[in-house]
Amino acid sequence: MPPSFKDTFVELLRRASTQLPQDVTTALREGHAAEIQGSPASNALETILENISLSRRNSTPLCQDTGTNIWHVYHPRTICKTAIEEIIREATAEACQRSYLRANAVDPITNLNTGNNLGQRFPVISFYEWRSSAIRAAVMLKGGGCENVSCQYALPYEPIHAGRDLEGVRRVVLDGVFNAQGRGCAPGIIGVGVGGDRITGMIEAKHQLWRELGDENENPLLSKLEKRLYSECNQLGIGPMGYGGKTTVLGVKVGAIHRVPASYFVSISYMCWASRRACVTIAPSGKLTYHKRVPRYFGCNTPNCKGPSH
Amino acid sequence: MKTIQLPINGNDIQKLRVGDEVQISGHMVTARDMAHRYMTDQWPDWLVPLLRDGAIYHCGPVVSQNNGVYAALSAGPTTSIREEPYAHRVIARYGPRLLIGKGGMGDKTLEAMRQHGAVYIHATGGAASVIAKSIVHIHAVHMLAEFGAPEAFWELEVENFTGVVTMDAHGGSLHRTVREASQKQLFALLGDT
């Protein structure tokens, strides 16, 4: 008998919390090789790499801040979303009880912790209907430290002469990464959403964090911008943990969505080095596939959506 | 690598300098957002003996409990700058010698460290399983029901907890140095030199 949905989701949370995706680990190794041996930057990356192995081996959370849990569920039209949501909530409470997740849900009025990691819109779940008969669930754990240094600019932004074009985007991203320094647990991964409104722009920025670090943006203009920003962010010299060094970011990923004439937002979602994401596909037969790589279109509004300039 | 055995006195604190890598052993207490507000709103006396010449660790650990025995599974540092409004008063009143966290702190804390003899130690953010290994025992927990597990005061016994001194008792701050250097780079990249 295939495992229950609840058990599958608990397992997905365990993997997300304790196993860092391979692309991120590889990028951290490359960063380690680039730093001067014996420097605080190099030692910090060494500790991080040791932590990645230890967490996987012992099934303990990579980071104690297991963050906001952001779920994306792709489903056929026949599925009951309320039922899936209830199962995800049950799985969340169980994963918390098993110490894969920390009890992170705090009531902002009373400041009381709910104790089981469940709250209002907590976890965050988005559903996307697709034509496949399988269900695919992905979860990202985004810590509070890096969320705190995420930011949003409305262009034109005069302090650094950022106008309403990709050069303006480049300028505010550099400014945002500079302002974050090491506080978001550098080396970070920078998701950028160009356009949209204050909500959809940030959602686009967060969607970019699902992408594999080594992938190529389909839009040649954005691809060029990503490469330039990756190189330039790493010239800032902030380094791992803000100790100074060559590895300030592991990747920059830029998406664009349409805006209204009056607004030109650049939303920057900073992800710490512990970019935790996991994905499973459940076939109608119950067969499970845990994906080593997050499938390419994950995070788009619809699987086949096209952004601007396509 | 320098070793620090807690409690530590003011003379030994003066010997620590920005850039020193350290291994800490002894007793430390976690305190983060709610704890700092509580410490500076209510000024609880019971904390003084726990913190005097000791260490405050900015951390909200994942802790398991088996038959009443607590164990830290995942216990990395949280971002310290959020405690900037409180830390200088905490240093003056409770006399901790080490503040441990990540991301560094600001000028008010740096000045309080210079005045009262304390240093800031940066632990590796996110390296929570490795750090938890150095927590050999949990002596007690305070305010668990009031603040919840991440925000409670956990009394930890640590062995060879590693970190880097990034702010010292002589007014030195690696965070300030890196910020200034990276600002120059930023201006160069923006063509605003």
Image (cartoon, coloured by chain):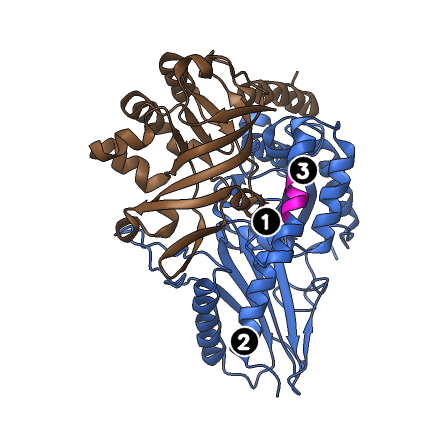
Q: Which residues are drawn in magenta?
A: A47-51
Chain holding disc 3: A
| Amino acid at circle 3 | Leu
- Disc 1 to disc 2: CB gap under 8 Å: no
Q: Is residue A50 above or below residue B180?
A: below
N-term mark: 1 or 3: 3
Residue B107, image quadrant? top left
Q: Is residue A156 left or right of residue B55?
A: right
Q: Evaluate if marks 1 and 3 touch, with contact meaning CB atoms under 8 Å apart.
A: no
Q: Nearer the viewer, residue A124 or B193?
A: A124
Left or right side of A169 for B13? left
Mark toward the start of the polypeptide (2 vs 3): 2
> In the rendering, at what x and y percent does residue B15 appear?
50, 13
Q: Which residue lies at the image location 58% right of the left edge and 53% below the top edge? A: A206
What type is the residue that disc 1 sits on? Gly
Tell me the residue that label 2 is attached to: A7
Q: CA distance from mark 1 to mark 2?
A: 39 Å
Magenta stretch, main secondary structure class: helix
Quarter placement of the C terminus of chain A: bottom right
Q: Tell me the brown chain.
A: B
Does the segment drawn in magenta span residue A205? Answer: no
* Total number of numbered discs in the rendering: 3
